[in-house]
Amino acid sequence: MKTYQYLLLTLVLTSAAVAETTNTWFRIDGDQQGHILWVGGQNGQWVHDFIFYPAPGWIEADLGRLINIAPGNDLQPMIGLNHDPIVGRLNWIVPQLFWFSNNGKHSSEFWALYYMRATKSLTDSHWILFQERYEINSLIRIGPQFEWFHNYTQNKRAGTYLGLGMKIAYGPKMSVDLSVSRDLDNDRGVARLTFLSYF
C-alpha cells in the first residue's frame, strides 16, 4: 500500500513541476465532525489538493482531472489517499466525483466520495453532497443543501442532512458559506461553516 501512496504523491508533485499552478485556493471547513484544512490548485486540466484533519492528525492527497462538459458545467473525477502519519498507516483510498455548475444567478455543486478502508479497524462509507446557491444580490447567494452519509461496514445510514445555506462574498476571491441543516437520521441540528479563498 505504501507504493500507492508514494505513486500518488509523485504524480501530484510531478504535475506541479511540469506546469504552472493556477486557480490556487485555500479552504477551511468546520462542522460537527471537526475541522478540515485544504489547499489545492490546477495544472492545465489536472487538479490536486492536500487536506489536513487537525483533530486526528490525518493527511490526504488527491489528484484528478477537470473536464468541461458544457458551458458553465465541469466534471472532476479524483482519487485520493488518506494517511495517518502518527500511526504510520494508510486509512482509506478515496475515489471521488465532483460536478460544478455556474450559470447566471445559479451555482450548484455535487460531491460523491467513497472511502474504501485500507485497514480493518475502519469502515467503508460514502459522503454525498448537493448544494444550490441562488444569487440574491452581488454579495449573497442562498439555497438548499442535502448531504447523505452511509456506513457500508455497519450497513446503516450515518446521517441524512437537509437544510439551507448562505454564501457571502468577501471581495472577488473570498467567500464564507454557512449551512444549517436537520439530520433526519439522528434527530439533531447540524451546521457547517466554510471559508474559501483563491490566490
Image (spheres, rainbow, N blue to C red):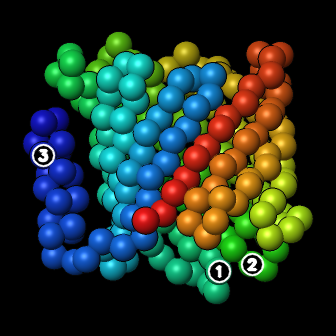
Quarter location, residue 15: bottom left
Residue 198 vertical placement versus 186 (above, below): below
Q: CA distance from mark 2 to mark 3?
A: 39 Å
From the viewer's perspective, tell me whether residue 187 is left or right of residue 122. Answer: right
Marker disc for residue 6: 3
Mark 2, secondary structure of its residue: strand
Q: Residues within 10 Å of mark 1 (few under 14, many from 20)?
A: few
The mark that comes first in sequence, 2 or 1, is: 1
Mark 3, secondary structure of its residue: helix
Residue type of the residue flagged with mark 1: Gly
Mark 1, secondary structure of its residue: loop
Query: Which residue position holds label 2?
Result: 103
Q: Position of residue 2 (x, y in %)?
A: 12, 36
Regarding residue 119, the answer to whether it shows in the image is: yes
Number of marks present in the image shown? 3
Q: CA distance from mark 3 to mark 1?
A: 34 Å
Residue type of the residue flagged with mark 2: Asn
Where the C terminus falls, by quadrant?
Answer: bottom left
Regarding residue 77, the answer to whether it shows in the image is: no
The mark that comes first in sequence, 2 or 3, is: 3
Choose between 154 and 88: the one closer to the eye: 88
Q: Residue at x 20, y 16 (%)?
A: 87
Residue type of the residue flagged with mark 3: Tyr
Q: Residues within 10 Å of mark 2 (few under 14, many from 20)?
A: few
Query: Which residue position holds label 1?
Result: 72
Choose between 10 and 171: the one closer to the eye: 171
